[in-house]
Image (spheres, rainbow, N blue to C red):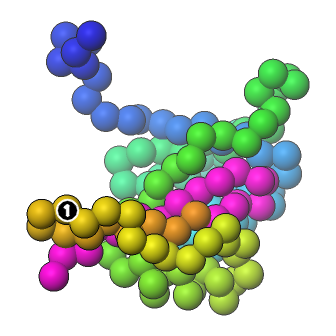
Amino acid sequence: MSTAKLGITQIGQIALRAQDLERAVIFYRDVLELPFLFSTGDLAFLQCGEVRLMLSRPESAAVDHPGSIIYYKVTDIQQTYDQLRNQEVQFIDEPHLIAKMPDHELWMVFFYDTEGNTLALMAEVRE
């Protein structure tokens, strides 16, 4: 089914579970430097471009698991990787080439947040 028929145009919000909400807010706000919007009860909201990130304590065992991988676009993947390593972010690998496209190279590196969720940095490197 085409998204044009449904009217879906972009992601508006992504929810990630957080065992320790305060610790997760510090990671996303202070380490990844996403603008903090507000918190209410067991929820906290941050902004990443046009997408809102919702951190929430798990409401039940069914949703108490790490979330999907979120890929954060960056301009300089090596510089961002170095900055986050200096803040003791736990990386799974090092920045590496994923694919050579006709007009750019796609680079990625994967890491964990404080709640065990896998995240990634991605960069489209043009020559």
Q: Nearer the viewer, residue 25 or 61?
A: 61
Percent x, y of residue 4? 18, 18
Q: In the drawing, does residue 1 fall left or right of residue 97?
A: left
**Secondary structure at numbered mark 1:** loop
- Can you say whether 17 is above or below 61 in the image? below
Q: Measuring 27% from the left and 10% from the top, which residue is drawn there?
A: 1
Report which residue position mark 1 lands on. 101
Q: Residue 86's image quarter?
A: bottom right
Q: Residue 112's image quarter?
A: bottom right
Q: In the drawing, does residue 19 fall left or right of residue 72?
A: right
Q: Nearer the viewer, residue 66 or 58?
A: 66
- Can you say whether 114 is above or below 6 in the image? below
Q: Measuring 74% from the left and 57% from the top, which residue is drawn there?
A: 24
- Can you say whether 105 is above or below 21 in the image? below
Image quarter hosting the C terminus: bottom left
Q: Magenta span covers which residues?
A: 111-127
- Can you say whether 76 is above or below 63 in the image? below
Question: What type is the residue that disc 1 sits on?
Answer: Met
Q: Residue 32's image quarter?
A: bottom right
